[in-house]
Image: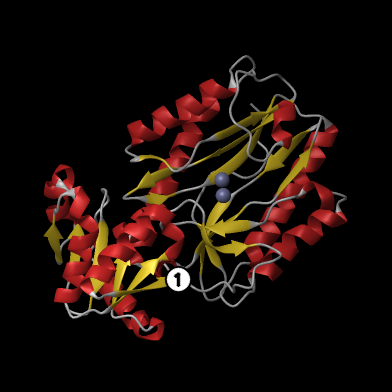
Amino acid sequence: MGQTDARRRRLLGKLEGLRADAMLVTCPANVRYLSGFAGEGCLLVTADKTTLFTDFRYEEDAVRSAPGCQMACPPAAQLDSACMAEARAAGAWVVAIEAGEMTVSAYRALEQAAGEQGVALVETEQVVEALRLIKDADEIAAIKRACALTDEAFSDILKCLKPGVSERDIAAELLYRLRLLGADGPSFDFIVASGTNGSKPHAVPTSRRLCAGELVTLDFGCRVDGYCSDMTRTVAIGQPSPELARIYRAVYEAQRLGREAYRAGLPCARADAVAREYLASQGYGQAFGHSLGHGVGLDIHERPRVSAASTAVLEAGMVVSCEPGVYLPGTGGVRIEDLCLIESGGCSVLSQSPRELLER
Ligand code: ZN
Ligand code: ZN
């Protein structure tokens, strides 16, 4: 990542409004975003320099992956006092902390170390996350690569989808293939939901075996350079019943409408309503119980939420999922999901796997 310097400058620009002159970054994804370093550690960003605090296990990686950062490896017991002493040495008397990322005991220890140095702490929320909303070129390239590997793994796995194969086997096979293709690892625990399990949006793969006439929903993704992909496809094993085929058509159309609506300037709540209203018109209003989408980046679920309650507005450079679903207990379910890069007049869909119903 060559853009970490620019990201840290953008963060410094935000600190004035927070009445802080430095920020202690402890959220691992935020540390990676601002420094490039992916190991365990925290980052102290001050006006003149950034210090990465880590330990012996990561020292070699840290030097290589975090250009432009000073390195410090204090003993674990002295980490808090070393951070606060560094802040004070840099002339920072008020240090912003990530309130949502700290346990009560960690906060108390830091507060004491700050007090000993005469440094004040100020609690902040979602400061670096707000910078991460709009992806830069390096981030978009990594997400595109992760989506391409996901497409490739999906095309490979289609051969394995046949009666008798268990959900767990499919999940294991997907992970193995993604690893072979060069992914860093999975972006979350995969969902493989067949038959009536399909009515559970976040079903955990079981030993249940695929049967002819059923649908199977695969929701999976991988990481490349830390960045996630996230895709869902629902496939028929043999010929589905007219009811399942009708559900599929409704979700397919809702997802198409969602993707076609996505563009910079569209309120997230409005985007959600486009898909939701269509599914309601087809009689599935109650069967779509989750939001239409979410941001994706270093975390699998980031802001913005594309939901009815969201006050966010889509902006160019955001990467969000479009994933309507219909879930009918006792019958099954369908979800179709793609990641979309928001642009001024529309969006680019980052996954290429076919969306029409595939029968295996
Ligand atoms: Zn997903
Ligand atoms: Zn998703």
Relative to the observer, which residue lies in front, 287 or 179? 287
Q: Using the rendered image of the protein, determine whether residue 298 is visible from the camera's viewpoint.
A: no
Q: Is residue 245 left or right of residue 185?
A: right
Q: Specify few, some or many for label 1: CA neighbours under 10 Å numbering under 14, 14-19, or 20 or more.
A: few
Q: Observer-nearest residue: 121 or 206? A: 121
Ligand 1 occupies quarter: top right
Q: Give the residue furthest to the top.
A: 164
Q: Residue at x 73, y 36 (%)?
A: 199
Viewer-proximal residue among 159 and 103 = 103
User: What is the count of numbered marks?
Assistant: 1
> How far across and how far down the image is residue 123, in percent?
42, 71
Question: How far from the left and from the top, in percent, is residue 146?
Answer: 40, 47
Q: What residue did someone put label 1 on? A: 130
Q: Is residue 262 left or right of residue 92?
A: right
For the residue marked with disc 1, what is the amino acid? Ala
Residue 218 pos. (x, y %): 58, 35
Say if 161 sits above or below 62 in the image.
above
Tell me which corner region of the image, top left, top right, bottom left or bottom right, holds residue 355: top right
Q: Is mark 1 within 8 Å of ligand 2?
A: no
Left or right: residue 153 versus residue 46 is right
Q: Quadrant of residue 235?
A: top right
Residue drawn at x 63%, y 74% as measured from the top left? 266
Q: Position of residue 24 (x, y in %)?
A: 30, 66
Quadrant in the picture for the C terminus: top right
Residue 228 visible in the displayed image: yes
Q: Quadrant of the N terminus?
A: bottom left
- Tell me the residue at 54%/45% (across/down): 231
Identify the residue at image location x=34%, y=66%.
Answer: 137
